Image (tube, rainbow, N blue to C red):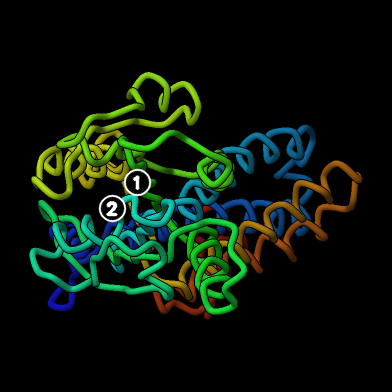
Amino acid sequence: MINAQNDYAVKSSVSQLKGSVSKKVKDLRERILYQIAFIESALDDPEHISLDGYEEELSGKLDTMTGEIEKLVRSADSGRVVSEGIRTVILGKPNAGKSSLMNVLLGEERAIVTDIAGTTRDTLEEHIRMHGISLNIIDTAGIRETDDVVEQIGVSRAKLAADEADLIIYVVDGSRELDENDAQIMELIRDRKAVVLLNKTDLETVISEELLQEKTGKTVISISAKEETGIDKLEKTIQNLFYEGSIDFNDEILITNVRHKTALQNALNSLYMVKQSIENQMPEDFLTIDLMDAYEQLGTIIGEAVEDDLVNEIFGKFCMGK
């Protein structure tokens, strides 16, 4: 929590300190352990504990558990955004106003701004906080076809940064008609989380918000980086894209630890194997192998080993040996 990058990270840290992840993992382990103990008890005492129809019942419970773990694994992407910040890449043609936007967001003249096309030839990364949200924001070279070798490298790096981005801000020069370079950028953002900025609204514009909306299918905001107008709407839009309706810290559990995500994925794979064994009509003792593996994988998250868990569960729930 001390190292939290933003307000959302603080809330997530508080939630984890309250034991939300631990409680969920312990609940899953208890349910898995019960199934292992039931199978072992039934195999040892078939006269009193029947496995008739059990595999169908277990399959239904596995569907529920795998669904819950899949949700936790998916939350790791949101968890990374919360803990590390939103990796945000600014794209656009040369002289669209990308560097001017970068400076406005930073509140200082960090990026070089000139009227010469192709001024930015490499990526420039800075960290900012915006209404409690952390952005790792990257200014990139203007995307266009060029014979300049250095500029070509800059364009390649811009595209690579876009591929790795959580959010793309596409800056359009509203005073110039769209061209093939814009078409190329639109293709880059087609299936990505992106916001389109219609910049230079302080000048006479030849592009409308409606046209950009139609061509990109993304939220379009009119701004003037020079006059610093429309920035507040951009900030609110980013907040809505990543948090409102997506992450509710009172209800959602976020996985922010890579090791935890790996253990959850391993546990999930083991439960998938149990489902496969049921479909293949394998003997019940085969099921316990993968169930136990899932149980152990989840235990690594909360630092608990198997020890005598299974023996205690069998004696405590199924009265074996009494």
Location of residue 129 (image quadrant):
bottom left
| Residue kind at label 1, given as amino acid type | Val
Identify which residue is drawn at 13% across, 55% down.
130
Q: CA distance from mark 2 to mark 1?
A: 7 Å
| Residue kind at label 2, given as amino acid type | Gly
Q: Residue 7 appears at what percent x and percent y?
A: 13, 58
Identify which residue is drawn at 15% across, 36% down.
202
Above/below status of 117 relative to 217:
below
Left or right of 134 on screen, residue 76: right
- Residue 97, disc: 2
Give the quarter of the figure containing the N terminus.
Answer: bottom left
Give the quarter of the figure containing the C terminus.
Answer: bottom right
How crowded pointer 2 is (Cα within 10 Å; few <14, some 14-19, many 20+) is rated as many
Q: Which residue is mark 1?
A: 171
Q: Nearer the viewer, residue 312 or 117?
A: 117
Question: Residues at badges 2 and 1 in contact (C-beta under 8 Å)?
Answer: yes
Location of residue 25 (image quadrant):
bottom left
Labels 2, 1: front one = 2
Looking at the rendered structure, the secondary structure element under dot 1 is strand
